Amino acid sequence: MFFFDTNYLLMVLLPGMLISGGASLLVRSAFNKYSQVASIKGYTGAQAAQILLDQAGIHDVQVVPTRGFLSDHYNPSSKQLALSEGVYSSRSVAAIGIACHEAGHAIQHAKNYAPLHLRSALVPMAGIGSGIGYTVMAVGALIQQSPIVMIGALLFAGVLLFQIVTLPVEFDATARAKRLVVEAGIVYPEERIGIDRVLNAAALTYVAAVIGTLLTLLYFLMRSGLLGRRD
């Protein structure tokens, strides 16, 4: 079985664990550090997000609290900007950065930012690919049927496409947050260093996800002989 394949261990599991684990560690480290640094003006994460929404003329998005660690997100369907417990009421530099990043997504939505709409459209495809696609690839590899692996790979590629489209969406929201948080007078320019480090670390998690999915796809294609020579 591929679970005991040395190539799977070396090509997918170990690199994936190192990359995703390293990215997660950077996020936690940056957040923990700058969650201890209070912003000079004293805005909470919720207040910071609301300021950006108001200045963008967005009055139909509700800022709400949600449970979980860094579970912050913007839902285009319900138009709710949900901030986690450590962000919503916190007055830290880290909380303000994350809250403004999510507000950046709401601004993207209001301005009809094309990649955001494309990502939303790809959600069903990504869901099918992550479940059915991976299973079909695995079964095809186990029974050594390249056509089945190819079918699974095509489905699984939907996950990769979704993650690739996610990159510009997240990078743009981060860029907006970094710029607007100062322009809106929420923090002073010198406080940007903490926000930058938290948001840059968070952006790496999306890059790590793309790499992990790509490694998985390449492994199955190579194992089935569809890519390169089969041993």
Image (spheres, helix red, strand yellow):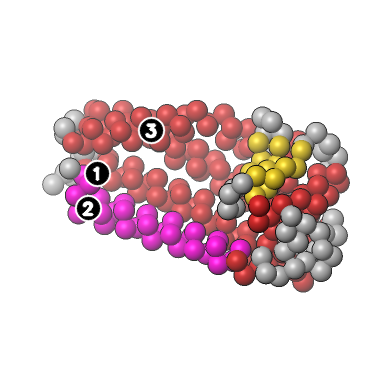
Q: Which residues are magenta?
A: 2-31
Q: Tell which circle, 3 or 2, labels the residue nearer the N-terminal end.
A: 2
Which residue does the image show at 31% across and 52% down from the upper left? 12
For label 3, the residue is: 131
* Residue at image location 35% in from the left, 32% down from the top: 133
Q: Residue at x 49, y 59 (%)?
A: 24
Q: Quadrant of the N terminus?
A: top left
Give the label on residue 24, or none.
none
Q: CA distance from mark 1 to mark 3?
A: 20 Å
- Mark 3: amino acid: Gly
Contact, CB < 8 Å: mark 2 with mark 1?
Answer: yes
As drawn, is 104 to the left or to the right of 222?
A: right
Callout 3 touching callout 2 (CB < 8 Å): no
What SS does tag 1 mark? helix
Question: Is residue 13 within the magenta segment?
Answer: yes
Give the labeled residue for mark 2. Answer: 7
Q: Which mark is residue 222?
A: 1
Report the Cα–Cα distance between label 2 and label 1. Answer: 10 Å
Specify whether residue 199 is in view: yes
Residue 198 is left or right of residue 155, and the answer is right
User: Which callout, 1 or 3, points to the residue nearer the camera?
Assistant: 3
Q: Amino acid at mark 2?
A: Asn
Q: Amino acid at mark 1?
A: Met
